[in-house]
Image (cartoon, rainbow, N blue to C red):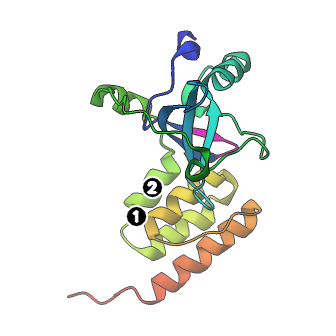
Amino acid sequence: MGDSNKIPAPGEIYYVKDKPYQIITIAVHTHTSEKMVVYQELFGEFRFLVQPLKLYMEERYQSDLTVVKDDIHEADPQKQVSTMNSGIPASTDTNVSSQDIHQDNMDPVSNLLLQFLDASSYRKKLEILTSNRKHINDRIINDMAISLDCTVDEGPLEERIQELIVCLEAMSRFEDRRLR
């Protein structure tokens, strides 16, 4: 696609192995003036990571992905640098139109997730979750947990599904079942 040479814009969200990362900004290194991509993990410790723009673009171009929004470089842990310690000032270049942001965040939404979000009670949400276990992935688990304001730890998929089930069972016990 022609998007492979597009410089990442602030607010873009990418997924690697169903784990979300968000582009924060393009920064400039104080000593070398090299452009750097600053992005944040949207899971776990929510770390801020930095990678040279040139390296980011080369790896993105070499991967030849058809969906750019699902691409991000998982940096080598030895090369990851927290912005707090990097000495890299954030760029003030945030000339991104709202239309660009809207288009960047238009990942397809799972019908299963929509059913879950539209369910009128925790009991119905639990039924949807348990009857569709084989169609659930880490991204859907994360989205479901966020909608319930529950914390589901990283780990094997089955354990994460079970944690969400426990959360929903607890919530459904306290759900008001009486008609008013």
Residue 45, quarter of picture: bottom right
Q: Classify 57 as above or below 156.
A: above
Q: Classify 159 as above or below 174.
A: above
Out of 174 and 130, give the one closest to the viewer. Answer: 174
Q: Which residue is mark 1?
A: 119
Q: Which residue, as the protein is rendered here, is positioned at the far left?
A: 180
Q: Which residue, as the protein is rendered here, is positioned at the far top?
A: 2
Whether residues under marks 2 and 1 lie with C-beta atoms below 8 angstroms apart, the answer is yes
Q: Is residue 162 left or right of residue 2?
A: right
Q: Is residue 135 left or right of residue 23?
A: right
Residue 169, quarter of picture: bottom right
Residue 74: image location, x then y, percent: 71, 39
Say which amino acid is labelled 1: Ala
| Quadrant in which the N terminus is drawn | top right
Out of 53 and 142, give the one closest to the viewer. Answer: 53
Residue 9: image location, x then y, percent: 45, 29
Magenta range is: 14-18
- Alpha carbon separation for disc pair 2 and 1: 6 Å
Out of 69 and 75, give the one closest to the viewer. Answer: 75
Say which amino acid is labelled 2: Gln
Magenta includes 16? yes
Mark 2 residue crowding within 10 angstroms, few (<14) / some (14–19) / many (20+)? some
Q: Which residue is mark 2?
A: 115
Q: Is residue 77 left or right of residue 48?
A: right
Residue 75: image location, x then y, percent: 73, 39
Q: Secondary structure at mark 1?
A: loop
